[in-house]
Amino acid sequence: MNILKILEEIQAEIQPLLEDGQVADYIPELAHISPSKFGMAVLTNEGEQFQIGDAAELFSIQSISKLFTLTLAMQLDGDSIWERIGREPSGTAYNSLVQLEYENGIPRNPFINAGALVVTDIILSHLNNAQETVLEFIRKLANNENLAFDLAVARSEKKTGYRNIALANFIKSFGNLRNEPEQVLDAYFHHCSLAMNCVDLARAGLFLANKGRLPWNKEEIVKPNQAKYIESLMLTCGTYDSVGDFAYRVGLPGKSGVGGGILAVMPGEFSLCVWSPGLNENGNSLAGTKALELFTTLTGISVF
């Protein structure tokens, strides 16, 4: 199978969609990103790498970081994290406060903002410097020591993140944050600001495609059953409140971010990342979702 040729075909087909999405302009530092950008990278467990378009250009990973902070929290706290976070799709927007009121401050899942704040709180309770530890962890997963936070994006989110500030304080009022909301929010905003490219992200997802181990050195990141749990959550909760449509169209576990990136995994085979900054109404990359749908259709590869 000629993966590069398939990527070229996908790039040509999604071109009309690039101007249709809306960039995440509610984060001022992301408002200037051109919606015409498009990149895609596929990395296999055997070490093959295929990329196209703007796959080497850095972008803000935003909520894709939730995948990596969840993984680290599972390393640190194991199954006890599920005493404080659910494992169900929310059915509401990723920054909604509604469910927290009648579910006593327990977020539906770790991939909505409320859940990620609790995950960050768990990491903070174990580590003195959650920001640097998370950064070093993702550097290891991506095999790239040069990854860094985009401090301008972090400041921008802190300045305008009123809904996240409300979420953190609301969760604290239910006793589900152990640390001060300001500490949790500062770490969370930094995690979301991390700048990576499609190749970095695809490589960082390979441990999930390889039963919890890094393919290049066999280091165990999580147990095989934990990798299964994470991928299951990606499939059921990873793309905000359009997970059903994403699973129907793409057929792979995925985690999206409002920076326009989507990381997807085919267990046992490969990890891939697509980036296109224009978002649909659910906050997922419009052209990126279509590109992944075309990829699984043209290759005939999905989890189904």
Image: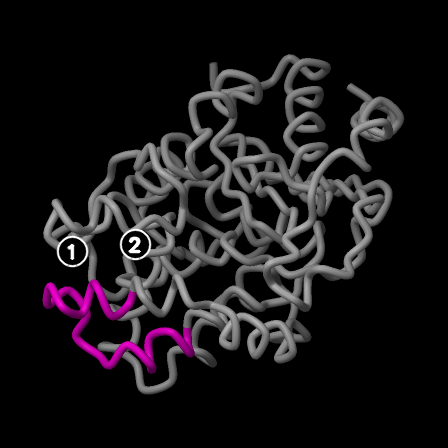
Q: Residue 162 in the image: x percent, y percent?
A: 42, 67
Q: Nearer the viewer, residue 210 or 89?
A: 89
Q: Nearer the viewer, residue 248 or 217?
A: 248
Residue at 35% in and 33% down = 232
Residue 115 badge: 2
Q: Nearer the viewer, residue 33 or 299?
A: 33
- Kindly check if marks 1 and 2 are in contact, taking CB atoms under 8 A apart as contact: no
Secondary structure mostly seen in the magenta stretch: helix
Residue 46 badge: none
Indicate which label's residue lies in the foreground, 1 or 2.
Answer: 1
Q: Quadrant of residue 45?
A: top right
Q: Secondary structure at mark 1?
A: loop
Residue behind mark 1:
105
Task: Give the mark nearest the N terminus, 1 or 2.
Answer: 1
The outermost residue toward the bottom is 128
Residue extent of the magenta highlight: 168-187
Rounded to the nearest angstrom, the CA distance separating label 1 from label 2 is 10 Å
Kind of residue at disc 1: Gly
In-image side of 254 versus 226 (left or right) = right
Kind of residue at disc 2: Gly
Q: Residue 53 in the image: x percent, y percent?
A: 86, 43
178 inside magenta stretch: yes
In-image side of 271 versus 299 (left or right) = left
Q: Residue 186 in the image: x percent, y percent?
A: 42, 78
In-image side of 182 versus 267 (left or right) = left
59 inside magenta stretch: no
Quadrant for the N terminus, please. top right
